[in-house]
Image: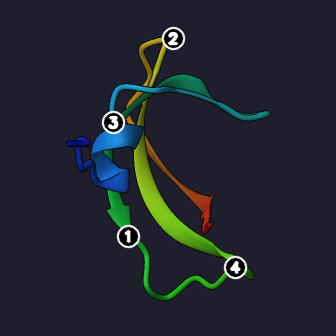
Amino acid sequence: MSNLHSIESLLIGKAYRSRSIEGIIEDAEPRDNVYYVDADAYAVRVRPTNGRRDEWRTLAVARD
């Protein structure tokens, strides 16, 4: 029997890096008002490694 995980639970705790911020994903939730072709949008709260305040970003998760 396989384990069933939500996308949110798989994102939380993972490293996040972009041009403007680097840190750990602390929270994730689906974004229904953002559309990507063949992908789902998620709002993620990132805790920066440099100690600044948390910031929200949108990322795309590909659909199979």
The numbered disc on residue 30 is 1
In the rendered view, tell whether residue 24 sits above or below residue 49.
below
Residue 1: x percent and y percent? 20, 42
Which residue is under mark 2? 50
Label 3 with label 1: CB-CB less than 8 Å: no
Give the structural element (helix, strand or loop) at label 3.
loop
Residue type (three-letter) at the residue carrying disc 3? Ile
Residue topped by disc 4 = 36
Locate residue 30: give its quadrant: bottom left
Earlier in the chain: of badge 3 and badge 1, it is 3
Are there few (<14), some (14-19), or many (20+) residues within 10 Å of tag 1? some
For badge 4, the amino acid type reads Tyr
**CA–CA distance in space, label 4 to label 2:** 31 Å
Which residue lies most toward the top here?
50
Q: Is residue 59 above or below residue 24?
A: below
In the image as oriented, which residue stretches furthest toward the right? 19
Q: Give the residue at x 62% y 66%.
A: 64
Whichever of callouts 1 and 4 sits on the residue coming sooner in the sequence is 1
Q: Which mark is residue 4?
A: none
Q: Amino acid at mark 1?
A: Pro
Q: CA distance from mark 3 to mark 4?
A: 21 Å
Q: CA distance from mark 3 to mark 2?
A: 19 Å
Sequence-earlier tag: 3 or 2: 3
Q: Are marks 1 and 2 in contact (CB under 8 Å)?
A: no
